[in-house]
Amino acid sequence: MQRNPGLRTLVHKGFPIPPMSPLLGGGAAAMLQKMLEPLRSLTYLDLCFAGHLDHSSLLCLARFAKQLHSLIIYVSLICKDETSNGQEQEHTLDLESTQLRQLEVRATISREDPTVLIPLLKASPQLEILSFPYYDGTLVAQIIRQYCSRLRCLKFEQTGDNYKDDEMAAIINSCQTSGLQLFSSNERLGLGHRAIRALHANSATLDTVKIPIFGYDTFITVQRLLSSCPNLRELRVSKRLNSPSNIGKFPARELLKDPWICERLEVLQLPIEMVHGGAVGGGNQANNPSVEPDDYHQKLYVQLGKLLWLQKLDLSFKQYLYNRTCKTSPLFSLESGLEILEGLKQLEVLDLSGTANDIKRPELEWMCEHWTMLTQIRGSLLDSWITAAGDKTVSEDDALALERVSAILVARSQPADDIYD
């Protein structure tokens, strides 16, 4: 490190933490200080610790953060110092004002409150992105409101304890001054009615939302986001692997209650459960959303057809069905009204893995012709044909057509410079 004093970005995975001992001068804290002290130009620091991180080491990083723009820490456990006399002083620490825009501290196990993070938050008035282990939600909300008025992104991706609904609502509400743009969670962190209302209050500014399906509250949340967030660009909803088996399919009747207004959406990941019925009459009804269909297919296609900037559409069930197929998924057949989606000219990826779709040769050829940016169609006849090359059940004409479609998609996925190599 001493040979690169001008280093601006440092990503170090598996950072070894030595045993804690007074003879080593604080162990990890001393090692961190020795490593970081020469790096006066460093602005981005991403460390993954192989072991436990004590408060002295975390404090060392906090004091070094005055020059950083981004500080990201992965650690298995945040714990109290073994040499500590039990008197916690972190709340009264005076840290120099930092330049931090991004602070992410992820602990897979959090047995002790990471109190040293509180003075670090107070010293970071320019903070925009925050992810941290569980702590008193009411206190964190007060600190954000008072000291971190620019905070726009909340990421709760790994926590030891779940936030209560009122705590999560308070934290989300604390970002209303700047306007919350990103909310991401891989756990169910108190997304109850109060937190949903708080998230909905930021509908004008929300840009990205990533949440798991965990019961009926999630259905309400997603429906409100789609129908009230005009600037939403990315919405990812997926099922937690350890959640009950009866939770995971998103009922179309909830999803389609109100018109969607998020017409700038670029990425949509949402496992939808349909009610299969007859055809809806093709694409002539695309501009007539008042038509009542026999099932939910036309309503879904009409809503999706508004998303003219959509680049990735993921309606798959691959994450949690363990090779089983969802029998009530969208068909995406021409008979069910696929032509309504002709306007999705920016679509690059369609993922229907784990679904009982009805995509055959005519649908593949139609998609290839009308979606000129498309490079991947997952979970369709094309996948099975490629996997089982030479399958006797595929006719010669169909095989030639599938080969043409596959070649076109492959060519589109290559960089322009590679085409002429």
Image: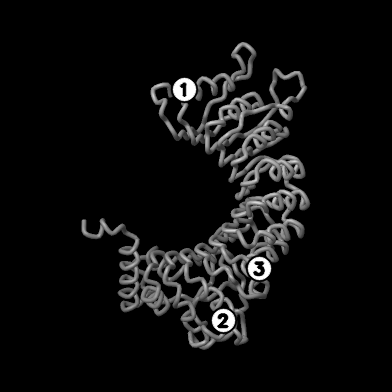
Q: Which residue is tagged 1? A: 38
- Amino acid type at circle 3 is Gln
- Looking at marks 2 and 3 on the same chain, the residue that comes earlier in the sequence is marked by 3
Q: CA distance from mark 1 to mark 2?
A: 62 Å
Quarter of the N terminus within the rendering: top left
Horizontally, residue 85 falls left or right of residue 355, namely right
Q: Position of residue 55 (x, y in %)?
A: 66, 27
State whether residue 251 is above or below residue 210.
Answer: below
SS at circle 3: helix
Q: Which residue is tagged 2? A: 298
- Looking at marks 3 and 1 on the same chain, the residue that comes earlier in the sequence is marked by 1
SS at circle 1: loop
Q: CA distance from mark 3 to mark 1?
A: 51 Å
Residues at marks 3 and 1 touching, judged by CB atoms closer than 8 Å:
no
SS at circle 2: helix
- Amino acid type at circle 1 is Pro
Kindly tell me whether residue 178 is visible in this rendering: yes
Kindly tell me whether residue 323 is visible in this rendering: no
Q: Position of residue 234 (x, y in %)?
A: 54, 60
In this picture the colour scheme is one colour
Q: Which residue is tagged 3? A: 223
Horizontally, residue 54 falls left or right of residue 392, namely right
